[in-house]
Amino acid sequence: MTFADPSIAVDALLASRLHNALPALWTNPARQAQPAAALPALGRTISLDDTHAAAARLARFAGLLADVFPELAATGGVVESPLLPAAALQPALGWAEGQGRLFIKADHSLPVAGSIKARGGMHEVLELAEGLALQHGLVQPGGDYRALATPAAREVLGRYQVAVGSTSNLGLSIGVVASALGFQATVHMSADAKAWKKDRLRQRGVQVVEHTGDYERAVAAGRAEASRNPMCHFVDDEQSFSLLLGYSAAALHLQKQLVEQGVVVDAEHPLIVYLPCGVGGAPAGITFGLRQVLGPHVHCFFAEPVQSPCFLVQMLADSTQGGGGHPSVYDWGLTNRTEADGLAVPRASLLAAELMQPLLSGVFTVADDTLFAHLVQMLDTLGERIEPSAAAGFSGPAMLMGTTAGQAWLRSAGIDAVLHQATHLVWTTGGLLVPDVQYQGFVQRGRTVRAAQA
Ligand SMILES: *Cc1c(COP(=O)(O)O)cnc(C)c1O
C-alpha cells in the first residue's frame, strides 16, 4: 500500500470528517447484489419467511388492537403509514432536474407510538402476549385474539412484567402497548429523556424509572433489574430478533404501495432509501425486508447525527479490522450529544451490523442544524410535522449527488446513467406525538438556521 492508493486517501478523509463531527459518507465495499436467502444473524439465521411470520402475527392481532386502541378503529387494527409523493420538496432541498423523484414513507404519522417504533415494539409485545396466551389457554391457535381483552385474560397477563431501556420512542411504544394488554410495564429511561414522554407513559399506567447517564446506562440498569425477575420480559433493543422482524414487515406493505404509485424497481429504475439510524434495529429490519422483496436494485443508506454515528463506526471497524470490535462514538472523540434523541446511541446493535454487512449500501452523517432546517421545509412544503430524528434522511440525496464520495458511489453502482429514472425514498420516522410547545421550539430553531443560510 502506498499513499497513491485512492482508498487510503478516502478513508483518511472520512476518518478526519468523523473525528471532527462533519457530515460524512461511508459506502459499503462488502455489499452483495445477490446475498444468500437466509442470512446469519448473531447465532441464528433470518429469512423472508421470518418477515412473513411477523406480518402474519400483526394481522392476527389486528382485531384486538382495534378494540384496545380507539385510534386504530378506522384501519381495523392495521398500523401503517402512507407513501407520500414529495416532488414539492425537491427544489427546497436544492435538487437539480433529472435526478429522479422523491417520496416520503411517513412513519412519523404511525398511530399509537407516533414513530417507527410502533412496528418493532408492537410486534415484540404481541409475540410475548401470544406465547403466554397459548401457554395459558387464553386463546387457541387460529382463534379470535379479542379474547385477550377480557378481564380474566388481562389478569393472567398482568402477572407478567414487560421492561425496556430506552431514551424515548422505544419506551413509548413498548410501554403503551404492554400496558394496554394488561402487562405490568416498566420503562427505564435516561434522566435527560423528555418530560412529556415520561408524562405520557405515566398517564398510561407505565412505571418510569429514571437513570443518570446515557442510553447505555439506562439499558444496562433495566437489563440487570429484569434479570432478577423470572416473570419479567426485557425488550433488548440491541439483540432482539422480534423487534427486527417487526420492522422488516414494513417492506411487504411498502412493496404494495410502490406498485400502487407506479414505482418500478429494476436496473433502469433504482430505488434509494434513506433511513434514520439509532442502534440500527429499525433501519436494519427494514433494509433486510426490502432487499428480500425488491432485490439488488434497492439501495439502503442509514442516516446518523454527526455526534452519534455508531453504526458507521461499527461498519467501518467490521470492514477494516475483519470484525470483532464494538467501537463506541466516544472512542472517536465524539459526544453523543444531539437533539435527535431517537438517534442518540453510542454503540450499534451487533445483530443489526452483522445482518447489514452484505445488504447495506452505506451510512452518512448529518449536523443537527440541518435536521432542523429540513424539519421546517417539511412543514412549509408538505404541511407534515416531524421530529428532529425523523429529518435525518433528507440530506441523503445531496450526500450522494453533491459530494465526490457520493458521485463515485453512484458511478460504481451504475446508477449515474439512470439517475433521472431513480426513486429516492426518505423514511420519516417520528413526530406524531410531539406536543405543540416542543414542536414550535423545533420550528423556531429551524427558521433561525434557514435565515442564517440565506
Ligand atoms: C428509534 C428511532 C430511530 C432508529 O431506530 P433504531 O432501531 O434505534 O436504529 C429512528 N427515528 C426515530 C424517530 C426513532 O425513534
Image (cartoon, helix red, strand yellow):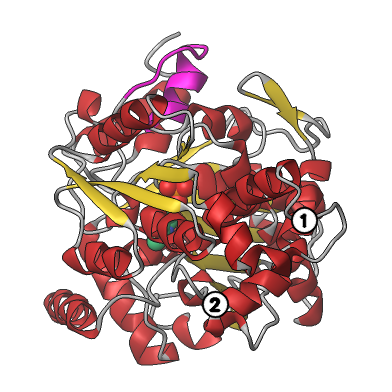
The one of 253 and 185 positioned closer to us in this rendering: 185
Q: How dense is the environment of label 2, judged by Cα within 10 Å: few (below 14), some, or many (20 and up)?
A: some
Query: Is residue 254 among the parts visible in the rendering?
Result: no
Name the residue at 52% across, 43% down: 281
Name the residue at 57% across, 46% down: 243
Locate the C terminus and report the quarter of the image it occupies.
bottom left
The one of 14 and 165 positioned closer to us in this rendering: 165
Name the side, left or right, on which 215 lies relative to 141.
left
Label 2's element? loop
Placement of 305 over or under 439, stated as above or below: above
Indicate if the residue with disc 2 has its beta carbon within 8 Å of ligand 1.
no
Q: How dense is the environment of label 1, judged by Cα within 10 Å: few (below 14), some, or many (20 and up)?
A: some
- Which label sits on residue 15? none
Name the residue at 63% across, 71% down: 65
Report, in whole angstroms, how far the alpha carbon at label 2 lies from the one at label 1.
20 Å
Name the residue beneath numbered marker 1: 139
- Residue 85 % position (x, y): 60, 83
Name the side, left or right, on which 391 lies relative to 401.
left
Placement of 104 over or under 288, stated as above or below: below
Mark 2 and mark 1 in contact? Answer it, CB < 8 Å.
no
Name the residue beneath numbered marker 2: 69
